[in-house]
């Protein structure tokens, strides 16, 4: 029988920790070899540390036979922008089999974000290899962002995911009937504990601080620089208003240094002290070392791990602004923002922050219905079967609060309830009216180009 080799592809330490937890929990059957394929998807990978250079990686590395670099394999191409041309796939497969000493091994894959490169390129390269997809964040609760070639999608056996919102089932890859499989929280916490043991440069403070999480959303085009500066300043002001005088800011690794200086100055003005945590450690490691009295962020997955896995108080900032400006509507960040906005308290609402607890089963069920409507509005061609549920939700639940999760223009384009203002609801929804509306829009566009 041929040797079996499983290739685990990772781009973040959080993802590597998720895979390590899945291995420890016995979710992967034994194979002859385990190869960890590291990919650095940063805009400038030459100057950005990759996963295998992060503090604590050595503990995760012990679970694998060898660590490989995808960047070195495909150099000088960038992992996020390169994929093999159809005619070149056999050549690339022969090349990597020789380079990675695979021979005639039976290859199995474990990847994240299968709809984009580098995961998609790897799946295309090993034609016919069975695939497990693992999710390392809140995006697993949303729709698949792009239509996947059935030759790839039908090979996915499972979606491995963390129980970030207990009771909520992922929508990702359900168009292929892929079953979700939980990675036990206990196993994940054990791996995170190992990472924290190795992190000795984040000392435990005498007083529990408020931990502020930066995300660098302007680099993704979600916010402008000024908007993100104001969002971070709002974190400081809100935390101080709740009585916190010791603050720790954990910036995104490539965020501008000036933001940290602005926050330090703002904290001093308000009579508080802000320290900078610029070590490239997971937020979950910081939770264990700092034991913060409050965790504040925009829509980071780390907010849900803080609340669900560590029982820490949490608060959100700026989700309303992000929802209002997020474009296009199909932007895959929409689901994480929606979840955080719907479940977590606003930092400006002190009583809500003090009283917040993990959501009840009823509230999670309400969120699930909302996410199906949002998911259909994002990807109607991938999930046509969700139209009836989306129409039912929009017909009965749209109000001044829930409108923040939808756009009238998007609903109009899909002929969904809510597209027409209530005062115009008498207009019949028939083919003639829709044809006249299309002509009017085409005339407007043509006039605008002159």
Image (cartoon, rainbow, N blue to C red):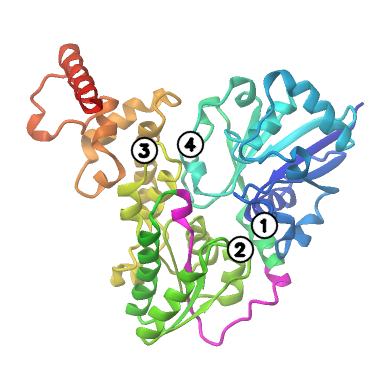
Quadrant showing the C terminus: top left
Asked if the residues shown at circle 2 and circle 1 are in contact, with their CB atoms under 8 angstroms apart, the answer is no
Which region is colored magenta?
196-220
Asked if the residues shown at circle 2 and circle 3 are in contact, with their CB atoms under 8 angstroms apart, the answer is no
Picture layout, residue 377 above or below residue 57: above
Tell us which disc is closer to us: 3 or 4.
3
Task: Give the image quarter of residue 345.
Answer: bottom left
- Across and down, in percent, residue 90 comes to 78, 21
Q: Residues within 10 Å of mark 3 (few under 14, many from 20)?
A: some
To which residue does mark 2 refer?
Answer: 282
Work out how far the residue at label 1 is from the one at label 4, CA to CA, in angstroms.
35 Å
To which residue does mark 3 refer?
Answer: 329
Element under disc 1: loop
Asked if the residues shown at circle 3 and circle 4 are in contact, with their CB atoms under 8 angstroms apart, the answer is no
Q: Nearer the viewer, residue 152 or 124?
A: 124
Using the rendered image of the protein, determine whether residue 361 is visible from the camera's viewpoint. Answer: no
Element under disc 2: loop
Earlier-in-chain disc, 2 versus 1 = 1
To which residue does mark 4 refer?
Answer: 171
Tell us which disc is closer to us: 2 or 1.
1
Tell us which disc is closer to us: 2 or 4.
2
Work out how far the residue at label 2 is from the one at label 1, CA to CA, in angstroms.
19 Å
């Amino acid at each position: 029988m041929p040797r079996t080799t499983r290739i685990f592809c990772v781009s973040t330490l959080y993802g590597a920790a998720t895979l390590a937890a899945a291995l420890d929990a016995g979710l992967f059957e034994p194979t002859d070899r385990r190869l960890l394929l590291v990919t650095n998807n940063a805009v400038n990978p030459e100057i950005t540390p990759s996963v295998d250079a992060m503090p604590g990686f050595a503990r995760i590395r012990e679970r694998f036979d060898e660590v490989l670099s995808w960047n070195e394999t495909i150099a000088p191409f960038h992992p996020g922008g390169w994929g093999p041309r159809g005619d070149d796939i056999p050549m690339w497969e022969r090349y990597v089999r020789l380079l990675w000493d695979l021979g005639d091994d039976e290859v199995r894959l474990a990847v994240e974000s299968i709809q984009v490169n580098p995961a998609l390129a790897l799946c295309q390269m090993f034609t016919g290899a069975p695939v497990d997809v693992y999710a390392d964040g809140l995006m697993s609760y949303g729709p698949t962002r792009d239509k996947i070639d059935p030759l790839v999608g039908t090979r996915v056996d499972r979606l491995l995911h963390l129980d970030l919102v207990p009771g909520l089932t992922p929508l990702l890859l359900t168009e292929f009937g892929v079953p979700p499989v939980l990675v036990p929280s206990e196993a994940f916490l054990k791996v995170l504990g190992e990472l924290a043991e190795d992190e000795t440069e984040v000392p435990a403070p005498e007083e529990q601080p408020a931990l502020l999480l930066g995300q660098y959303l302007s680099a993704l085009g979600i916010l402008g620089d000024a908007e993100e500066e104001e969002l971070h300043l709002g974190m400081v002001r809100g935390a101080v208003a709740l009585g916190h005088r010791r603050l720790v800011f954990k910036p995104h690794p490539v965020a501008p240094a000036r933001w940290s200086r602005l926050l330090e100055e703002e904290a001093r003005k308000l009579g508080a002290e802000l320290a900078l945590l610029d070590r490239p450690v997971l937020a979950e490691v910081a939770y264990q070392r700092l034991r913060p009295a409050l965790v504040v962020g925009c829509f980071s997955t780390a907010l849900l791990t803080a609340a669900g896995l560590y029982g820490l108080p949490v608060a959100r900032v700026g989700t309303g602004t992000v929802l209002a400006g997020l474009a296009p509507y199909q932007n895959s960040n929409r689901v994480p923002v929606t979840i955080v906005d719907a479940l977590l308290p606003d930092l400006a609402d002190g009583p809500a922050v003090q009283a917040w607890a993990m959501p009840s089963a009823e509230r999670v069920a309400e969120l699930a219905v909302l996410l199906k409507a949002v998911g259909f509005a994002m990807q109607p061609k991938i999930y046509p079967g969700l139209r009836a549920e989306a129409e039912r939700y929009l017909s009965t639940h749209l109000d001044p609060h829930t409108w923040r999760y939808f756009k009238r223009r998007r609903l109009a384009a899909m002929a969904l309830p809510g597209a027409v203002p209530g005062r115009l609801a008498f207009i019949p929804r028939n083919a003639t009216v829709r044809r006249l509306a299309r002509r009017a829009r085409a005339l407007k566009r043509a006039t605008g180009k002159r």
